[in-house]
Amino acid sequence: MTDTTPKRRRRKDARPAEIVNAAMDVFVEHGFANAKLTDVAKRAGVAKGTLYLYFETKEDLFRATAREALTANLEALEQSSAAFNGSIADLVPMLLKRAAGRMGDGRVPGIVRMVLAESRAFPDLARIWHDEVVARILGRLTELVSAAQAGGEVRAGDPGLFAISIVGPMVLGVLFQEVFGSDSQHAPELGMLATQHAETVLHGLLVRS
Amino acid sequence: MTDTTPKRRRRKDARPAEIVNAAMDVFVEHGFANAKLTDVAKRAGVAKGTLYLYFETKEDLFRATAREALTANLEALEQSSAAFNGSIADLVPMLLKRAAGRMGDGRVPGIVRMVLAESRAFPDLARIWHDEVVARILGRLTELVSAAQAGGEVRAGDPGLFAISIVGPMVLGVLFQEVFGSDSQHAPELGMLATQHAETVLHGLLVRS
DNA sequence: CCATTTAATGACTTTCGGGTCATTAGATGG
DNA sequence: CCATCTAATGACCCGAAAGTCATTAAATGG
C-alpha cells in the first residue's frame, strides 16, 4: 500500500481556473481586504507562491475573479433575454420567476453583494458590471416596456422608471437574504415574491384602479 | 499680532462626537479596511493617539460610528411614521416622496452602502440595523397594508411582500446612484422615481386591469 | 504664581499579510 | 536512465498601518 501520489503535480493549464474558483469563494466570503491569499491557496490546493505564477498581484487576481463571475452570468443572461415576444402581462411574471430561480441558489447573490461592497475601491469594475449587466438588463426591460406602451398595453410614463419598478423588489429581496439571512421575520421567499410582485406591478395594489 | 491660540486644547467632552463625525466620513468613503486612523485623526483635528483616549480599537470606533449613524436616522424615522392615517392611495406617494427627499442629499446613501458592505465582517451590526431600521420600516408598512386590506382598499396577498413591492424600487434607485453614479443612462432621478413608482404600485402598469 | 493633574501628542513598536526567490521535484526527451 | 527544464514550494522579506507610551503642555486650584 505505498502511496504513489506525488506531493506536487504540474498542471499549468488547469491551475488558473482552479485558483480563480477558490478565490471567488474567499473574496465573496471575506471581501477583498480581508481575504488572505494563503486561504485562497489552501482552498485551491496550492502553495501561495503558485498564485504568483499566474497572477501578478492580489488585485490582479481579484479582477480576474470578478471578470469570471461576470462572464458566467452573462451567458445565463443571454438565454433569458431570448424570450421577448408576447405581452408584458405574460413576460413579467416569467422573467421575475426566472430571476428568482437563478438568485435562489448558487453564488450569484454573494457576488452581487461583493460587487456592491468593492465598487468604491474598484470603480472600473463597477463600470464594467454596469455596462455589461445592469445596463443590459435595464435596457432590455425598458425597450420591452416601451414597445408595450406603443402597443397600448402599458400606460404612459418613463419606461426606464417602469423597469426599476419591475426589478427593484427582486433586488431588494436578494440583498435582504444575503445581508440579513433568511431567519428574519421580514425575509421574503424569492419565489413567492416573484409571483406576487409580478401581479402587483402589473395590476396595482388597489382593488380597482 | 502674537497668536495666542494654543496648539493643543483640552476638550474631553467634545472630542468623541468630533472624532465619530470625522470617522463617519472616512469610513463611508473608504470602507472599514481601507480607512486609515491617521486620516480620521487629521480630519478631526487631532493626533492619532487621541483617538485611543476615547476608543479602544479601530473596530470599536467603527461600531460607535455605525451606532451613531443609526440613531441619527432613527429620529427622522419616528417623524415619518407619525403620519399613518389616511388611505394607502394617499400615504404611499407621500412616504416615497419623503424617502426620496431624505435619500437625495446627505450621508444616508453612503451609510446604507457601508452597512451593506461591512455586514459580513460585522454581523452584529447587520443585526442591529435590521432590528432597528429595516424591520421597523417594513413592519410599519406591512401593518399599513394589512389594515388597508381589512378595509377592502387593497387586494388579497401577503402584506409583507406588498411592502417590498412598495419600497424595493426606491432602494434600488438609491443604490444605483451610490454605486454607479448619476451619469449612467439608466440612473433614476429619485423624485421622479418616487412619483411614478407610487402610481405604478398602486394602479399597475397595465392600461386597464 | 507655582504645583499638580491629565488631555494631547507623535515617534516608536508590533503585527500581519502581500510579495519574493532560492530550492525542490515532477515532467520531458534524447 | 540521466540531463535538462520549469512548475511548484514555503521560508523569508518588507512595507503599511494599528496600537503604545514617555513626554509635553493646557487647565486647575491652592
Image (cartoon, coloured by chain):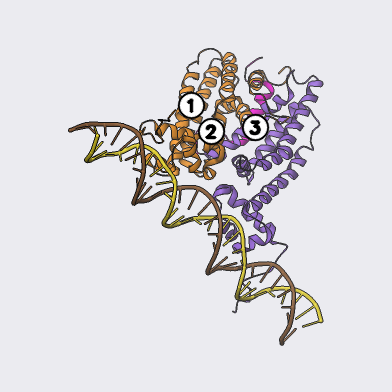
Chain colours: A orange, B purple, C brown, D yellow
> Which residue sits at x=51%, y=40%?
A39
> Which residue sits at x=59%, y=62%?
B48
Do the residues under discs 1 and 2 have CB atoms within 8 angstroms? yes
Give me the C-alpha separation between circle 3 and circle 2: 14 Å
Mark 3 closeness class: few <14, some 14–19, many ≥20 residues within 10 Å: many
Residue type for callout 1: Asn
- Left/right placement of residue D2 relative to residue D17 reads left
Which residue reaches farthest front?
A1
Looking at the rendering, the stretch of residues picked out in magenta corresponds to B183-209
Q: Chain of mark 3?
A: A
Q: Chain of mark 2?
A: A
Instruction: Write down the residue under mark 3.
Output: A176
Query: Would you say residue B45 is visible in this rendering?
Result: no
Mark 2 falls on what kind of element?
A: helix
Q: Position of residue B110 (x, y in %)?
A: 60, 44
Q: Quadrant of residue B165?
A: top right
Instruction: Write down the residue under mark 2.
Output: A111
Query: Would you say residue A169 is visible in this rendering?
Result: yes
**Earlier residue among tags 3 and 2:** 2
Measured along the vertical axis of the image, is residue B7 above or below residue A101? Answer: below
